[in-house]
Image (spheres, grey):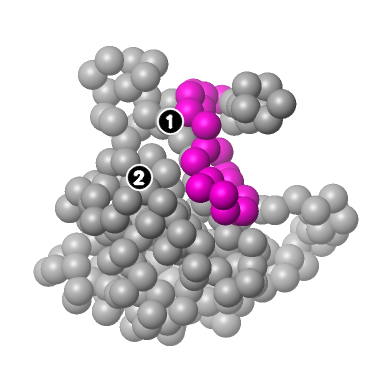
Amino acid sequence: MKDIGEYVISENIRVSFHPGSFNVLASENNHVVEKTIDELNKHAEIFDLMGIPANHYYPINIHVSTTKPNHEEAMQRFCRNYQRLSDTCKARLTVENDDSENRYSVKMLYAGVHLKIGIPIVFDQLHFMCGPQDQTNQEALELALSTWNGITPLTHMSSSKLIEVAGVRRSAHADFIYEEIPTFGNKFDTELECKQKDLAALRYFEKYQK
């Protein structure tokens, strides 16, 4: 693990974790919360064993996920349970906007999570298109970017699978990126969430990074 971490740092590779959707720090079920805390702390321990610095340049990114009994109380539970995480997990944790109109926008996360516990918001472009529309694309992106406290922000980009296959969920990820990443003049890193992974990145560079 240490050898891998040394290679990551020497080659200036930005790595991150995105634990699965079953990790619900804001759950009303204490058993789910306990398992989530254990899982998130294990992700942090892997980074620790690799010698990866404990900061948001190497994030562990999750969603609030639940809205029970309402958005406000769920975000309050998220913030309370965040305090139960290990120090190196707390130092890396980020939160992401959702791909459902009934869940969390960047604006909601900013008020209900970031201003409470200070963790950065990962802006997901496809999720913005599918989620609550309470800001413009530029406003939501720039609000998320403002939460990173001097660290290069990380965002997510994917195209809808609807471009490739009719009848699927709009929020499903496509094999490739079919749109240029909108930056509005801002600087940030982007993680491409595409089914074809490196092939998608190479195709994107060929098309847009000439």
Q: Position of residue 143 (x, y in %)?
A: 42, 64
Does the magenta-highlighted stretch encompass residue 187?
A: yes
Circle 1: residue type: Ser
**Residue where numbered disc 2 is placed:** 127
Q: Mark 1 packing: few (<14 Cα in 10 Å), some, or many (20+)?
A: many
Q: Residue at x 37, y 29 (%)?
A: 160
Q: Is residue 154 above or below residue 37?
A: above
Q: Position of residue 130 (x, y in %)?
A: 28, 41
Q: Is residue 39 above or below residue 172?
A: below
Q: Is residue 92 above or below residue 194?
A: below
Q: Secondary structure at mark 2?
A: helix
Q: Is residue 71 above or below residue 182?
A: below
Quarter of the N terminus within the rendering: bottom right
Give the extent of the magenta segment. Answer: 175-196
Asked whether the viewer can see residue 176, the reply is yes
Q: Position of residue 74 (x, y in %)?
A: 23, 71
Q: Mark 2 packing: few (<14 Cα in 10 Å), some, or many (20+)?
A: many
Compare marks 1 and 2 and give the one earlier in the sequence. 2
Q: Residue at x 57, y 53 (%)?
A: 186
Q: Give the quadrant of residue 121.
A: bottom left
Q: Residue at x 53, y 77 (%)?
A: 90
Q: In the image, is 52 to the left or to the right of 156? A: right
Circle 2: residue type: His
In the picture, the disc for residue 159 is 1
Between marks 1 and 2, how big is the CA–CA gap? 10 Å
Q: In the image, is 67 to the left or to the right of 111? A: left
Quarter of the C terminus within the rendering: top right
